[in-house]
Each structure stands twice: as structure tokens, then as C-alpha cells.
Image (spheres, rainbow, N blue to C red):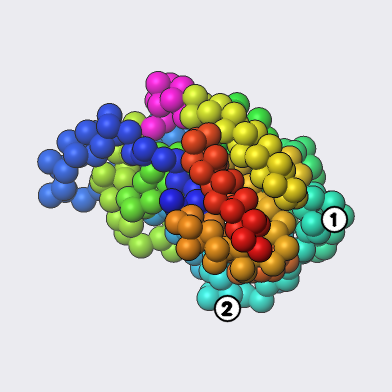
């Protein structure tokens, strides 16, 4: 049972697979992004000039790192390590702002150096599952700074309450991914929402046709009202299943961080390495925490799954405890 990955189980849905299969008939032509760009723009109430389709959110990290020449780049951790890796690969020094477990990884905007001209933050954050208030993040935006908010998991939040996708703030770049909710990790599709001058700067360093025709179809058809309704329903299910997972983990005496809002939870686990190995031997993969800056081996990230899966996990976990 793989609880280390956060892709929604049972995805991609049948209707989406059918649409993707149909798109193969047009593979002889180079991809044309116009329809997808328009659909994504309409979904977020933006203009097409504010949208750039990318080969997953991951490509956007690279485009940002290639297009910008920050004097002081800051990444708020713990978070997904790829944005920092992309900046370093492009030759930019990176400073870290480390949020602390004692305050449940809450973001204090004052911790971000005022003269940082590039700031990267995840919302909701992988791996802490913390959802920062949009209003708090908005205070980080200012002229002369690019603020990148990675919203790869925002569509797993009912109502996307804290999204900045529709906000018109100076230098704000919002990244989105279709990987998690729609089960399209292998297709590579995401997008960035930003002021037109930044979109143009990122587009200039993007390889031609990096987003394939089937990926563009995915972006278009998952932006329809019906698809958004489906995603919203899935987000509500995640919330219910996460509540159950939290309760069961707490019944084992474990500390689940804060008020988790993503499709995963972060848990403080004494002797985490031994527990992770024991769970693996019992057939459960959970995500190690030690590869995230600011965390260590005594942190594990666990994907939200249905109640039956959670019950099986908790039973295996309790058995480890009994065996010592
Ligand atoms: C927080 C976060 N952002 C971005 C990504 C990358 O998403 P994509 O598959 O769209 O490149 C991931 C993948 O795990 C992630 O966890």
C-alpha cells in the first residue's frame, strides 16, 4: 500500500482517459496551446496572456530559475525541494526561511528578508499540509519582488479558499498542477498564472512544444464546470478521510502537525526510521521526512486514503508497538 505518493486513488477517471485516447488521433500535428490557455484563463477569471501551460508545475520551477536573475532568492521550508534545486541548478544562491514545528510550521511573513527579490512558498505546503491564509501570503507580494506560490495541491482544498490564483498582486506567480487530483503525473501538465510580462519572460526560455497535445487536452477538459465539480467532490472526500486518519493516528498517541488541509498529513514519530522500516515490512510505504529541509528522520508523511486503508495502516502500526 503506497501511502508515500499523494496522487488521488482511482485516477485518471474513465472520461478523462477517453478524452486523452481520442486526442491521439491528432498526434501528427504540433501542439497548439490556444484552446487550453483560454480554458484555464476562464477557469480562474484571468486573461490568456496571464497563463503559461507547462510540462507539470516542475517545468515552471525551471523556467522561473532560467528567466530571472534574483539577487536574493528565498525559499520557505520545509517544502517540496524541486524549486530550490531548480534555482541552484541555474546558478542562483538560495537562502532558506525555516518554519518551526513548535508553531506548527505557521508562516510569519516577518521572517522573510524584506529585500528578498524572489520568494518561493508552497500552499498548501508539501509535506506539512499547512494551508497558509491567502491574506498572509499577499503581504509578501511587493513591487520589485517575484512571489512564487506553488499551489500544486490547492485543488484538493474544498472551495480552494486560500488560493491566490485570481489575485492581481505585483510579481505574483501562482503554479498549479493537474498531477495530483487527476492522476496525470505521467502526462506532465500544469500551468502558471502571472502578470503578462512574467508569462512572456518564462515563455521565452521554455522549449518549443514542451507541453504535448494530449497534455493540452487534459488542461482544457479539466477546466470545465463539470470537471471542477468533480474535483470539488473529491476534495470534500479527502477532508472527511483526513479527519478519520488524524483521529486514528492520534489514538496511537502520535502528534499530527497542526490543522492539516492537504491530501496528506505530517506526523512526528519517535524512532521514525525503525517505524518506517517496520511499516514497510508490513506492506505500507510512508514518506520519509529527512529529505525535507527543517525536518528529520522522526517525521513521516502519510497520504490520506479511505477509512479501510487507514484502519489497516493503524492496525499494522499498533502491531509494531506491541512487538516493541
Ligand atoms: C508541492 C509540489 N509542487 C509541485 C510538484 C510537481 O508537480 P508536477 O507533477 O505538476 O510537476 C509536486 C510533486 O510532487 C509537489 O509535491
Which segment is the magenta one? Answer: 222-231
Q: How far across and down, in percent of the image, does residue 190 sit?
A: 44, 47
- Crowdedness near tag 2: few (<14), some (14–19) or many (≥20) residues, C-alpha within 10 Å: few
Q: Which residue is mark 2?
A: 91
Q: Nearer the viewer, residue 313 or 127?
A: 313
Q: How far across and down, in percent of the image, does residue 17 sit?
A: 26, 37
User: Which residue is at 77% across, 63% downward?
Assistant: 98
Above or below — where is 176 with respect to 119?
above
- Crowdedness near tag 1: few (<14), some (14–19) or many (≥20) residues, C-alpha within 10 Å: few
Q: Nearer the viewer, residue 248 or 193?
A: 248
- Residue 223: say if magenta: yes
Q: How far across and down, in percent of the image, does residue 247 sit?
A: 68, 37
- Residue 294: say if magenta: no
Q: Main secondary structure of the magenta part?
A: helix
Q: Which residue is mark 1?
A: 102
**Mark 2 element type:** loop
Can residue 249 be seen here? The reply is yes
The disc placed on residue 248 is none
User: Which residue is at 57% across, 78% downward?
Assistant: 91
Q: Earlier in the sequence, mark 2 or mark 1?
A: 2
**Mark 1 element type:** helix
Q: How far across and down, in percent of the image, does residue 26 sit?
A: 15, 42
Alpha-carbon distance for marks 2 and 1?
Answer: 33 Å
Amino acid at each position: 500500500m503506497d501511502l508515500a505518493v499523494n496522487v488521488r486513488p482511482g485516477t485518471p477517471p474513465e472520461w478523462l482517459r477517453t478524452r486523452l485516447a481520442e486526442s491521439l488521433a491528432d498526434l501528427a500535428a504540433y501542439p497548439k496551446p490556444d484552446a487550453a490557455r483560454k480554458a484555464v484563463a476562464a477557469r480562474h477569471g484571468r486573461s490568456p496572456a496571464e497563463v503559461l501551460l507547462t510540462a507539470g508545475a516542475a517545468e515552471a520551477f525551471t523556467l522561473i530559475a532560467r528567466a530571472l536573475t534574483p539577487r536574493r532568492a528565498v525559499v520557505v521550508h520545509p517544502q517540496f525541494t524541486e524549486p530550490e534545486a531548480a534555482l541552484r541548478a541555474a546558478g542562483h544562491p538560495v537562502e532558506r526561511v525555516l518554519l518551526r514545528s513548535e508553531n506548527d510550521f505557521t508562516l510569519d511573513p516577518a521572517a522573510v528578508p524584506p529585500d528578498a527579490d524572489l520568494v518561493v512558498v508552497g500552499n498548501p505546503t508539501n509535506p506539512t499540509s499547512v494551508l497558509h491564509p491567502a491574506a498572509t501570503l499577499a503581504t509578501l507580494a511587493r513591487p520589485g519582488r517575484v512571489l512564487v506560490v506553488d499551489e500544486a495541491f490547492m485543488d484538493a482544498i474544498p472551495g480552494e479558499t486560500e488560493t491566490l490564483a485570481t489575485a492581481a498582486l505585483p510579481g505574483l506567480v501562482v503554479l498549479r498542477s493537474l498531477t495530483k487530483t487527476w492522476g496525470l503525473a505521467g502526462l506532465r501538465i500544469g500551468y502558471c498564472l502571472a502578470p503578462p510580462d512574467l508569462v512572456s519572460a518564462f515563455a521565452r526560455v521554455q522549449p518549443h512544444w514542451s507541453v504535448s497535445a494530449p497534455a493540452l487536452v487534459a488542461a482544457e477538459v479539466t477546466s470545465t464546470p463539470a470537471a471542477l465539480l468533480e474535483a470539488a467532490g473529491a476534495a470534500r472526500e479527502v477532508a472527511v478521510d483526513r479527519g478519520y486518519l488524524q483521529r486514528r493516528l492520534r489514538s496511537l498517541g502520535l502528534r499530527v502537525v497542526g490543522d492539516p488541509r492537504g491530501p496528506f498529513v505530517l506526523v512526528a514519530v519517535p524512532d521514525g526510521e525503525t517505524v518506517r522500516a517496520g511499516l514497510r515490512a508490513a506492506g505500507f510505504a510512508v514518506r520519509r521526512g529527512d529529505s525535507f529541509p527543517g525536518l528529520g528522520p522522526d517525521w513521516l508523511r502519510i497520504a490520506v486514503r479511505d477509512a479501510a486503508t487507514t484502519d489497516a495502516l493503524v492496525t499494522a502500526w499498533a502491531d509494531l508497538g506491541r512487538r516493541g
